[in-house]
Amino acid sequence: MASREQNERNFDKWQSLRNGGRRYVKIIAGRAGGQAHYIKEVDATEKTTRFTQHIFNADGKLIEVHEKFPIDLGHKRL
């Protein structure tokens, strides 16, 4: 389990959630001009509750979602 300091260092942005947890976001540039957004949600003790990957095309349109945690559901094309 990562600490709050480690999460802040590894992710570009974060916001506080109503339950006392946080949502962290890391944005990676894609090879074809799009972006991947890695979204990690944690509870108040920084325990991961959800982790997803959102893929955007070069126009900024969300084209794919990959739910990785708590259950890996694989890539879902939109």
Image (spheres, rainbow, N blue to C red):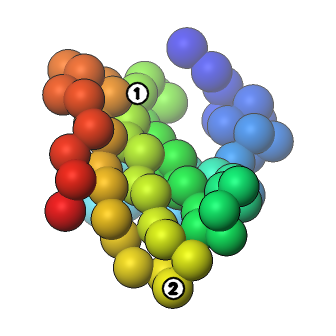
Which disc is residue 48 wearing? 1
Earlier-in-chain disc, 2 versus 1:
1
Residue in the image at 43% along x and 24% along y: 47
Label 2: element kind: loop
Q: How far is mark 2 from mark 1, CA to CA?
A: 31 Å
Identity, as a three-letter code, of the amino acid under mark 1: Thr
Residue sitting at 66 percent across and 25 percent down? 3
In the displayed structure, 77 sits above or below 67; it is below
The image shows residue 2, relative to residue 53, as above or below, that is above
Query: Which disc is residue 59 wearing?
Result: 2
Crowd band around label 2 with a 10 angstrom C-alpha radius: few (<14), some (14–19), many (20+): few
Residue farthest to the front, as pictured: 32
Q: Nearer the viewer, mark 2 or mark 1?
A: 2
**In the drawing, does residue 21 fall left or right of residue 66?**
right
Residue 77 location (% of width, % of height) = 22, 53
| Percent coordinates x, y for residue 70 in the rendering | 24, 22
Quadrant of the rendered structure where residue 72 is?
Answer: top left
Label 1 neighbourhood size at 10 Å, few (<14), some (14-19), many (20+)?
A: some
Task: Kindly state the secondary structure of the residue where label 1 is placed.
Answer: strand
- Residue 35 position within the rendered picture, expressed as x and y whole percent measured from the top left: 59, 63
Q: Which residue lies furthest to the top in this view?
A: 1
Query: Nearest the camera: 63 or 27?
Result: 63
Contact flag, marks 2 and 1 (Cβ < 8 Å): no
Q: Where is residue 46 in the image (x, y as percent from the top left)?
A: 49, 30
Name the kind of residue labelled 2 in the image: Asp
